[in-house]
């Protein structure tokens, strides 16, 4: 690793050397053989490259940690708890429209042709003048193993469902989003140390998808309300031209547009999954 990369990541040389010993022996495609070796150094490997988990940074507690809730319900806390939106999002199946509450006026819809596909598209809808208007559609990637409703830690699938979007962050400064934004200079370090400089920028900008996480916390928060085995750390982040370990990825200009357009007061939601299930 060059001195320039170390300075950019903000990691002292001594810590970087220690991380190299524990992380750089792993193959870039397969991820570390022992997740605890990376986690003990204070970082986890990038979500799109590891074979053992979904998190990017910082390290998460083990399944027996205090933040793992083995008794938590498997039912996501993202379904509409009040009146359902009176106008269905165009083309969205009833199971998904029934989870869009009346107070929501921005919905992102991510779909792919089949459940096994890693290539997808994401459309941004906004409710104005008593109708839903599609503002833009973007090319995206999702899990390298496709989509799964009952996903598990490390299975490389993206969860199917409707989720809130409440928090953002990244290595770089806030690009202009009104979502609560947490800048974290550790984000490029795990990617660079574990897999090389090619991956140091994929977490420059992040929107957390509220799957098995605690809304109102930084995207890197380690809490998993549904338990460790459900996985977590599912984000919108920068694309790397291949399938992910669960995240949905976009080109930088597209993600920054979403970050600047999304409005916390709109109670935004993302509906995602394969078209045969998500679309009516």
Image (tube, rainbow, N blue to C red):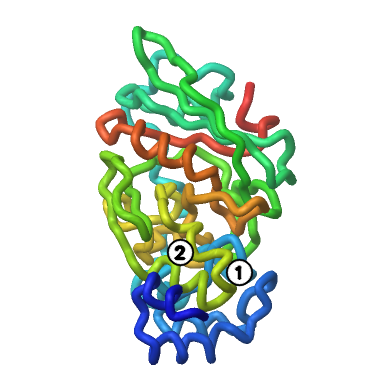
In which quadrant of the rendered image does the C terminus lie? top right
Seen as rendered, the residue at the extreme top is: 129
Q: Residue at x 30, y 40 (%)?
A: 177
Q: Nearer the viewer, residue 42 or 64?
A: 42
- According to the image, label 1 marks what residue? 50
Q: Position of residue 231 (x, y in %)?
A: 52, 61
Q: Is residue 178 left or right of residue 189?
A: left
Q: Indicate which label's residue lies in the foreground, 2 or 1.
A: 1
Res 199 label = none
Residue 15 is drawn in which quadrant?
bottom left
Q: Residue at x 69, y 70 (%)?
A: 29
Pointer 1 local density, CA inside 10 Å: few below 14, some 14–19, many at least 20: many
Residue 70 visible: no
Classify mark 2: helix, strand or loop.
Answer: loop
Res 227 label = 2
Please count the marks in the image.
2
Q: Nearer the viewer, residue 193 or 46?
A: 193
Residue 155 visible: yes
For marks 2 and 1, the one nearer the N-term is 1
Q: Residue at x 67, y 36 (%)?
A: 112
Q: Position of residue 173 (x, y in %)?
A: 30, 53
Q: Is residue 195 left or right of residue 215?
A: right
Classify mark 1: helix, strand or loop.
Answer: loop
Q: Position of residue 127 (x, y in %)?
A: 38, 17
Q: Position of residue 266 (x, y in %)?
A: 30, 28
């Amino acid at each position: 690793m060059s001195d320039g990369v170390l300075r950019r990541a903000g990691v002292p040389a001594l810590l970087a050397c220690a991380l190299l010993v524990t992380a750089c022996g792993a193959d870039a495609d397969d991820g570390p053989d022992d997740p605890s070796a990376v986690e003990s150094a204070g970082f986890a490997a990038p979500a799109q490259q590891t074979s053992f988990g979904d998190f990017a940074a910082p390290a998460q507690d083990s399944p027996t940690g205090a933040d793992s809730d083995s008794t938590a319900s498997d039912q996501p806390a993202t379904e509409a708890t009040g009146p359902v939106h009176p106008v269905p999002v165009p083309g969205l199946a009833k199971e998904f429209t029934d989870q869009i509450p009346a107070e929501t006026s921005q919905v992102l819809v991510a779909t792919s042709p089949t459940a096994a596909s890693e290539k997808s598209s994401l459309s941004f809808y906004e409710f104005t003048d008593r109708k839903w208007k599609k503002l833009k559609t973007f090319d995206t990637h999702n899990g390298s193993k496709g989509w799964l409703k009952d996903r598990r830690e490390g299975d490389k699938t993206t969860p199917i469902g409707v989720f809130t979007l409440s928090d953002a962050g990244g290595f770089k400064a806030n690009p202009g989003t009104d979502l609560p934004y947490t800048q974290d200079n550790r984000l490029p370090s795990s990617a660079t140390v574990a897999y090389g400089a090619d991956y140091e920028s994929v977490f420059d900008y992040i929107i957390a998808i509220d799957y098995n996480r605690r809304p109102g916390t930084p995207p890197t928060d380690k809490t998993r309300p549904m338990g460790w085995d459900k996985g977590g750390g599912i984000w919108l982040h920068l694309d790397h031209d291949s399938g992910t370990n669960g995240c949905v990825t976009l080109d930088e200009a597209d993600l920054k547009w979403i970050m600047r357009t999304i409005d916390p007061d709109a109670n935004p939601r993302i509906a995602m999954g394969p078209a045969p299930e998500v679309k009516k």
